Amino acid sequence: MPGSGQKHYGCFNCPNIVRQKDRHTISSRNRAFIAKLTGRTPSNSDFLCNKCRCMCQHHIKRKTSMPSRVQQVPAQSTEAPQFSPPSIPLPFPSTSRGHASCCMCQRQGPKLVVVPVGVRHHIFITKEVIIPAGARCCPNHLQQNIDDLNPLSTLFNKTGITELVKFLRNEVLKKERTRLDFDSRGNLASTDYQSLLGIPKTAFEDLLKYVEGKVKVTPVRTVRTTLAIFLMKLRGGESNRILSTLFNISKSSVHRGVKSIRTVLMNGGFVAENLGFGHVTREQIIQEHTRPLAQKLF
């Protein structure tokens, strides 16, 4: 007879045929999720299989346990950062900081350059004059022509004093690590220069004029130290490892220092003025580099 056969009960969500013991009525918590998932509204006689019921419970549990993520945008302060005004006097004179005129001789531009950090520190140590960061000067002052200094009174703030103390601390630590010190002119005698570099101290100072202001000063080596490394390598042919041990700097710094000195001497006029036939005239060769008999013949 029609309708007397076995009925098949399917899950409301999936097409699986569900046995009676695995049929689960749709609770009020799962009803909204199932309606949203299937697009159909379940009735009271509909049911879910065990797999779909666990899926609904897992989704609802995860949704309720996750905190609401509200993107909090930090309030941007419209106020400019406050710096303490320079109001603390120090017993060290300082120069001006303007960009339009030289901080040393007060000459108006153009062709002014920013005073490097190494030069500012050197002037402070030797002359006890503070040059503010960003100050400009004439290019010839980088050759240590600093006799035209016209210092003013010094007013510092908290930031400036902190930077000054850090600089002095770094200088002390650098001196403790230094093994061969060519920065101080009184540490090594002229005979020491002759033994280590192959030239006397006066010749070293003359050669320094060709590279001063043209070689980058780093926290671990100055221009004098870089030139000493270059001359010591020329004299004895020591490896970069030995030079790094003697001067207590890295091998890469030794390599860069030697390369920079070589480039400056080649392109800066020293080689052209002292080597080759172009640096001397025929008359100078006859008068200074020939014997008396050859001078009479020529």
Image (tube, rainbow, N blue to C red):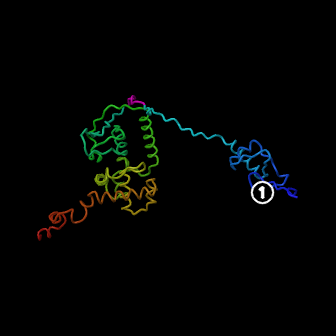
The quadrant of the image that shows the C terminus is bottom left
What is the secondary structure assignment of the residue under circle 1? loop
Q: Which residues are magenta?
A: 84-90
Badge 1 local density, few (<14 within 10 Å), some, or many (20+)? few
Type of amino acid under label 1: Asn
Residue at position x 25%, y 44% in the image: 110
Residue 207 percent coordinates (x, y): 29, 54
Residue 182 percent coordinates (x, y): 37, 50
Residue at position x 88%, y 56% in the image: 4
Q: Nearer the viewer, residue 197 or 255?
A: 255
* Total residue callouts: 1
Q: Hey, which residue is sitting farthest front in the picture?
A: 1
Q: Is residue 167 above or below residue 196?
A: above
Q: Is residue 110 above or below residue 22?
A: above
Write down the quadrant of residue 82 in the picture. top left
Q: Is residue 245 magenta?
A: no
Residue at position x 73%, y 48% in the image: 56
Residue 224 percent coordinates (x, y): 35, 51
Whether residue 173 is visible to the viewer of this picture, yes or no, is yes
Q: Nearer the viewer, residue 136 or 25?
A: 25
Q: Is residue 106 above or below residue 178?
A: above
Write down the quadrant of residue 86 in the picture. top left
The quadrant of the image that shows the N terminus is bottom right
Residue 227 percent coordinates (x, y): 35, 55
Q: Which residue is mark 1?
A: 16
Whether residue 195 is visible to the viewer of this picture, yes or no, is no
Image check: 34 left or right of 137? Answer: right
